[in-house]
Image: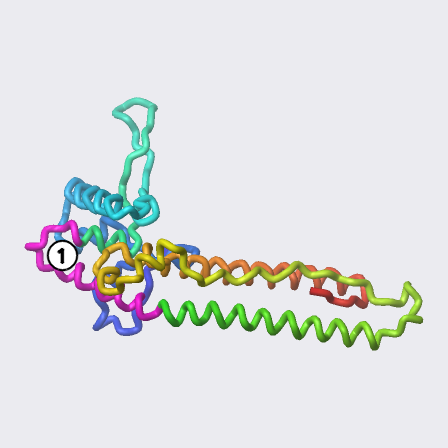
Amino acid sequence: MNIVPSNQQSEQSPFDAIRHEDEQGNEYWTATELLALLGYKTWKRQKETVERAIISCQNNKADSALHFVEVVQMAQIGDSEAYREVIRDYKLSRYGAYLTAMNGDPRKPKVAAAQSYFAVKTHESETQIPALLQHIQSQGQQLAELKQDMATIKAVLARVLPTETPEADKPHLVVLPPKPEPPKSSLTVEERLFLSDPWKARKDPNWFVKSGFARAAAENKQYEKDVEAWKEECRRIVAQARVKGDCQIIS
């Protein structure tokens, strides 16, 4: 768990200062840190605010388990040897943190500041989505061009390799696994219907999920992980093959 540093500490928002990233690079905030900034000092008040935010999330037909992840610890029951799980905190997605701020006391100045912060961050994310979709499409096009180039190379190799070469002298073939297919960027029927009224969609606090942008971002992140795993597997296969002698790589 790492708190994301800022290059300009003097201008850093206090909400940036408590933003974390997990091992997969997903950002999150903890409820105790966020609500402490908003003026909620006791766990009882913090937990009540988060529970209201979870209800709001469920009313918006969003997956509350995705945006509010319980952090539990084992607590001893009295003086006995029995233990039970106790919720000690929540990991909040950006949307979960936004809903938590929206369910805070609007009379608190820091609550209003948090609402403004997460609204701005949501807008920034919105402006990045078109570039993300364009990047996905560009990767798909590059993959298609690479496949065409590989087919051409295979055809040339088939013509120039001498057929008279004894079988023992021929390089052994090494077949690499296929590269993962890029995600499809097409929208579902529900997402197209939701985006048919852009003004109404922008007002929906759950627009990032309903519009398909959250799904596209998750699919692209998973695709990048799959590609890195594929590259690592290919390097391993090629390294093992070269130990045995000359080899011909086929992807």
Q: Magenta segment: does it hold 125?
A: yes
Q: Residue at x 25, y 48 (%)?
A: 60
> Where is residue 183 drawn, in percent x and y?
49, 60
Q: Residue at x 28, y 58 (%)?
A: 207
Kind of residue at disc 1: Val
Residue 65 image-quadrant placement: top left
Residue 54 image-quadrant placement: top left
Q: Residue at x 81, y 63 (%)?
A: 172
Query: Does residue 118 appear anywhere in the picture?
Result: no
Q: Is residue 17 above or below residue 88?
A: below
On-image quarter of the N terminus: bottom left
> Where is residue 219 drawn, in percent x and y?
45, 58
Dominant secondary structure, magenta: helix
On-image quarter of the C terminus: bottom right
> Where is residue 21 drawn, in percent x and y?
36, 58
Q: As drawn, is 141 to the left or to the right of 215?
A: right
Q: As drawn, is 230 to the left or to the right of 208?
A: right
User: What is the number of callouts on the image?
Assistant: 1
Tell which of 139 and 42 is nearer to you.
Answer: 139
> Where is residue 209 drawn, in percent x and y?
33, 55
Which residue is at the far top? 80
Circle 1: element type: helix
The residue stretch that appears in magenta: 102-128
Q: Magenta segment: does it hold 81?
A: no
Q: Residues within 10 Å of mark 1 (few under 14, many from 20)?
A: many
Q: As drawn, is 186 to the left or to the right of 236?
A: left
Q: Is residue 249 above or below residue 63?
A: below
Q: Is residue 37 above or below residue 51?
A: below
